[in-house]
Amino acid sequence: MRILLIGIKGTGMSHLASFLKKGGHEIIGMDVDEDFFTSPLLSSIPILPLSSSLPDEIDLLIYSSAFEKRSIRAMDEARKGQILSLSYPEMLRELSLARLTAGISGTHGKTTTAAVSSYLMEKLGIKGGSIYGSFLKDKKTSYHSGDDYLLIEACEYQEHFLLYSLSILVITNIEFDHPDYFKDISAVREAFHKRFVSLERNAVVIAHSSIKALVDVWREERKDIRVIYYGMNTSYDVDSLAFFMSRKIAEDYIAASLCVSLMSLKLEFDEKTLMDEFKKITSLLDVPCQIAARNEVVKEQDGIVYIDEYAHHPSEIRVSIENLRMRYPESRLVVIFMPHTSSRTEALLDDFASSLSLSDILLLQSVYSSARGDVSSYDSSRLLIERIWEKKSRDNYLYIPNEAECLTFVSSFLKRGDVCITMGAGNNRFLIDKIIELKEKL
C-alpha cells in the first residue's frame, strides 16, 4: 500500500511509519518544517510540507490526533476523494485486531516499559513488532519481525486506549494528567476501569502494586482476567534488577520483563513457570537500555554532560532529577524546562514547583505551542515560576521565555562538571548544539 502519514514527526507516528515501512508499505509523510528527536526513524522516508496537496495514488491516509480538528489540505482532498483516512489510534486498533496485542498503559513510564519490552522481544526472537513513543538509540527502525505479537504504547488521553483489542495490559501507575480532557483523578481512574473491563476474554493484566485496591475491585466484573502484581511487597520486586539506582525505573524494566514473559509462554502459565521465565528474561538486562529522550546523554564536551529528557509530568520530573542526582552526585543539575500545555501546567502547579525545585539551577521557558493548541493567552510559565520563587531563590530559578536570551545565559553560566538537561515534551532538545556552539565562541 501507498500510505500518507500526516504529523509523521510525532513520537508515536514516527514509530508507526517505520513499522509500516518495514512491513513492506510505501510511506510518505507530511509535517511542519522543524526537527524532532524522532528524525532517525524517518531518514529514508520523504516528508512533504504540511501545506502540500494530496500525493497521487494514496491508498490510505493516517493522521496524528493533534491534527484532527485542523484544516489540512491533504486531509480535505482525501475526504473528497473518498480515500480511507484513519487517526493514529484508529490505525493502532486495526493493527491490534489482527494480532495478539499487548498494551503498555499508565500515566507515566509507558515509553520506557515499551522500549525495554521491544528490546527483549528482539533478543528472544519473538515474531512480532512494537510501536511506541521513542526508540532505542542503537536501533534506527522499529522492531518488526512478524505478525504474531504486537506491542503498543496505549495512552489514556481522550480514552484512545479503549479502541485497542488487547490480550495483555500493563498498567504502570494511575495519576491525574491531561486536565484538558479529564476533570479529575476519578475520571482518569474510570477510564482505566473501562479499559480493564473491555479487555479480550482471558486477558492478562500486569499491574503495579500501588493500584492493587482498584484492580481488585475491577476483577469482580471480569473474573476471567488474570492479574499479576509487581513492585513493592510482591514476588516481582526491584531486587532482581539491583543495578538500577532508581526504584521507579527498575520497576518499568520488571513490567517489561513480565510482559515479554507472557508472550514467550503464549499466555499459558502458572506462578512457577512465569517466575522461571521472568528470571531467564531479566538475566538479559545486564545494563540499562539507551532510550532516546529518556535521560539520554546527547553530548559530553569540555567536562559538561548534556542530557535530553522528555519528562513533562511532575512525577516523571521528580524521578528523572533524583536519578540524575544519584548518577552525578558532585555535579550541578542545570535544567532547561519547557512545560507542555497550559492546562497541565496550571492544574498541577504545586506539583511542578515541588519537582522542579529539586534542580540546582532552573531556566523556565514558555509553554510549548504544540499542535494540540492547549495554550493560554497568558503564559502559564509565569504562574509556575512565581510558585517556585515561594520555595527557592530567584537567583537560581529563572523565567527566560526568549530563546536567544536563554542560550546566551546558559552558555556563559555552564562550567566544567555541570550536567545540563533539556527537559519537557516540547522541542528544546536542539538547544544543546546551540549552547555548545556559543560556548566555543566565548
Image (cartoon, rainbow, N blue to C red):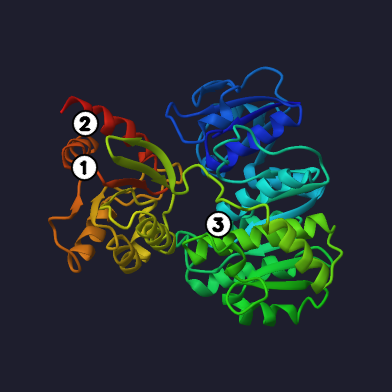
**Sooner in the amino-acid sequence: mark 3 or mark 2:** 3
Residue to which mark 2 is pinned: 439
Task: Using the image as rendered, state which of residue 28 and residue 211 is in the foreground.
Answer: 211
Badge 2: how crowded within 10 Å, few (<14), some, or many (20+)?
Answer: some
Residue to which mark 3 is pinned: 157
Distance between the Cα atoms at labels 1 and 2? 9 Å
Task: Using the image as rendered, state which of residue 413 and residue 203 is in the foreground.
Answer: 413
x, y percentage for residue 98? Answer: 82, 46
**Disc 1 + disc 2, Cβ < 8 Å:** yes
Say whether residue 134 is left or right of residue 413.
right
Q: Three-letter amino acid code at disc 1? A: Leu
Label 3: element kind: helix
The residue most toward the top is 56
Which quadrant of the rendered structure holds the N terminus? top right
Residue to which mark 1 is pinned: 414
Above-or-below relation of 29 to 307: above
Say whether residue 52 is left or right of residue 15.
left
x, y percentage for residue 375? Answer: 35, 49
Q: Three-letter amino acid code at disc 3? A: Tyr
**Disc 1 + disc 3, Cβ < 8 Å:** no
Residue occupying image coordinates x 13% and y 58%: 394
| Quadrant in which residue 222 is drawn | bottom right
Q: Nearer the viewer, mark 1 or mark 3?
A: 1
**Sooner in the amino-acid sequence: mark 1 or mark 3:** 3
x, y percentage for residue 175? Answer: 50, 69
Q: Three-letter amino acid code at disc 2? A: Lys
| Quadrant in which residue 28 is drawn | top right
The residue most toward the left is 395
x, y percentage for residue 396? Answer: 17, 55
Q: Nearer the viewer, mark 3 or mark 2?
A: 2
